[in-house]
Amino acid sequence: MRRELMRVAGALVMAAGLATALVVAGCGGEEAHGPQEAHKEPVAVETTTASLEGVAEYTTVSGRVQPLMRAELAANVMARVRQVTVTEGTRVEAGEVLVRLDADRASAEASRARAGVMTARAALEQAKLQSEIQDAASETGLTKAEQDLRMAESGARTEEKIQADEALRQAEADVAKAEEMLDMLREGARVQERAQARQAVDRAQARVEQARQGLDAMLEGARPQEREQARQAVEQAEAALRTAQSKLEEVEDQRRAQMQAKLATAEAAFETADATFQRMEALYEAEVISEQRFDEAKLAHQTALNQLTMARQEASLFDEGPDGEAVAMAREAVRQAEAGVVQAREQASLVEEGPRRQEVEAARQEVAAAEAALAQAEQQASLVEEGPRTQEIRQAEEALRQAEAQVEIARQQREMAYAGARPEELEQVRSAYELAVAGLAEADIAMQAVEAAQAQVAFAAAAARAAEVMVDDHIIRAPFGGVVVGRSVDPGDLASPGMVLVTIEPDSMFRLHCQVPERMLGHLSLGQGLPVTLDSLPDEDVTGEVSSITPAADPATGTALVKVDLLPNEHMRSGMFGRLHIPVAKGDTVLIPKSAVWSKESLTGAWVVADGRARLRFARLGRERDGQVEVLSGIVAGDEIIVDAPATLEDGDPVTTPGGGAEPEVPE
C-alpha cells in the first residue's frame, strides 16, 4: 500500500511538471515556430536509443554498519592512569601501548619476587651441597665403621700387622734423626760451614767493589778512546750505507737494462712476425699458399703481439711493480745499513752526552744492593762463628721428645694389632657402627631438605611469573591494528577491574547488520554479492557479500539477522546508516545512459530528437547501475536520446547526428 501511495505521488509530481512545461511551451509556442527559428544553424549532437532490458527489481532493507571486530580494552587491576597515548581517531598498530597505569607497587612486588627466586635458588644450592657432604660423610663413616667392626670381630689381619711394624720403624728413624740434629747443634758449626760463610763474605765484598767502580766510571763520563770508537762506528756505518746504496743502484740499472733489452727483442720479433703475416696474407688472398700456412703465420703474428704486450706491461710496471729478487736483497741491505747508521749515531750521541740520570740512579741502587748483600753475608758468618743459640737447641730437644712419644704410640698400636680388640673396644666399635647406620637417616633428611628447597624454588618462580604478569597488566596494548573509537580515561583517573579504558575497531573491515523479513530470506544465499547504499556516502558505490544468515527468525518481529561484509572503503565508519538492496523479481525496464540525464532543481528528464529537432522531455528516473539509469516514465524504448547535450542547446533547436542530417523545414 505504501509503495502504491509513493507511485501515485510521483505520478502527480510528474503530471504537474509536464503541465508546467506545456504552459511554458504554449506561451512561447509562437516564438518557437516563428520565422527566426527556421533560420537557426543545426547543432551537431551524438545520440543513442533508449533500450528495453530485463532489470532486477530490488527491495530495500535498512541496517547499521558495524566492525568485524571490536575490542573494549578494560583494566585488570585498580591503579591510577599514568599515561594515555591515544585519542579518538588515532590509528594504532598491533601491540602498540595505549594506556600505562601506575605500576610502582607491582614493579616492587616483581623485584621482591625475583629476589625471592634468587634466595630460593641459593638455599637450594646450599641444601644440595649439604646433602652431598652428608651423603659422602655417611657413606665414608659407614664404610670405615664396617671395616673397624670386621677387624675388631675377626682380629688383626696380616697387612695391618705389617703396617703397624712399618709405623714403628718410621717413628724410631725419626727419633734417630732428631738425636743427630741435636748433637750437631750442641757440637757447633763445622770447619767447612765456616769456610763457606767466609767465602760468601768475600764474594759480597767483591760485588760491592765492582758496583762502586761502575758508579765511579759512570759519574766520571766517557773517556776519549770511547768517543773515538763511537765516532769510528758512525763512519763505518755511513760507509756501509753508501756501499749498499751504490749496490742497489747498480742492481736496478742492470734490471732496467735487461727489461729494455727484452722489450727491444719483443719489438723486433713482432716486426718480423708482422711483416711475415702481411706477406702471407697477400699470398693467401692470391691463393698462392694454403690456408694452413696462413693460419700458422697468423698464430705466429698473434704470439709475437702477446709477447710484445707483456714486455711493454713489464716495462711500464718496472718502477712500481714487484721487485726482483736481487733488487729486493739490495734494498733490504740499504734498509739495514740505514738502521745501523741510526743506531751508531744514537750510541755516539749517548757517549757525548754522558750517562743519564736514570742510569746513574740504577748504578747507585746496584751499589746499595751489593752493600746489603755484604751485610747479610757478614751477619750469617757471625752466626756461624758464634754457634747455635740456646733457642735452637731447645727446639731440637722438643722435636726429639715428640719423636720419642710417637715411637711409644706406634709400639702400643703394634701391640693392639697383634693382640686383637678387647671386649670394651669391640663394644665401642659396634656403637660407632650403629651411629654410622643412623647417619644414613640424616642423609635422607638432607635429601628431603633438597626436595623442599626445589619446591620452594618452583613456588618462588611461579610467584615471580605472577608478579611479571601483574606488571604487564598495568600496560594496555592494542590487540590488533585499527582506529581508536573510544577513550574513557585521562591521566590521573582511577582505573578499576573491568573498567573499559579504550575501544578499538579495525579501520577497513566492516559489515552491514540488517533485520531482513523472513519472506525475503529465500532471495539470499551465502556469498551472494549485493548493492549497498550508505546515507553518509551517497556518491560511493558500495558492494557487499552475504557472510551470515541467522537460521532462526525472531518470532516477535518476524525478521532474521543478515550480515553483509563490505568492501574496504577509507570513508566508511561504524554506526553509519545503510540500505541493503535485495533482488526480489526481474522485469523489463527502459534504460538510458547516465550522460544523457538532464536535471534542474527537482525536475529530471532527457533531450530527445523528434522531427530533426531537440525536444526536452521530462521523465521520472530510477536507480543507476553500470552507467545506465532506469526510466520509470516519460521516455519509451526506441526514443532517440541525445548524449552529452551541449549546455547551449534549447528546446526546438534543429540538430544533426553522425550519418544523418536535419530535415529541412518550409516556413508557413
Image: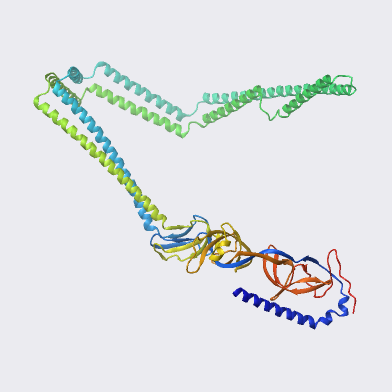
* Tally of numbered discs: 0
The residue lying at 52 percent from left, 30 percent from top is 350
Residue 397 in the image, given as x and y percentages of width and height: 16, 23
Figure check: 473 above or below 15:
above
The residue positioned farthest toward the bottom in the image shown: 27
How are the residues colored? Answer: rainbow
Figure check: 631 above or below 255:
below
Is residue 555 visible in the rendered structure shown here? yes
In-image side of 594 versus 448 (left or right) = right
The residue lying at 43 percent from left, 63 percent from top is 81
Q: Quadrant of residue 532?
A: bottom right
Residue 518 in the image, given as x and y percentages of width and height: 53, 65
Q: Quadrant of residue 267?
A: top right
Figure check: 658 above or below 467:
below
The residue closer to the viewer here, 411 or 349, is 411
Residue 536 in the image, given as x and y percentages of width and height: 60, 68
Residue 185 in the image, given as x and y percentages of width and height: 20, 21
Figure check: 149 above or below 106:
above
In-image side of 104 versus 539 (left or right) = left
The image quadrant where one finds the N terminus is bottom right
The residue closer to the viewer here, 36 or 318, is 36
Is residue 515 visible in the rendered structure shown here? no
In-image side of 246 versus 122 (left or right) = right
In-image side of 178 versus 107 (left or right) = left
Q: Quadrant of residue 646?
A: bottom right
The residue closer to the viewer here, 495 or 414, is 495
The image quadrant where one finds the C terminus is bottom right
The residue closer to the viewer here, 645 or 26, is 26
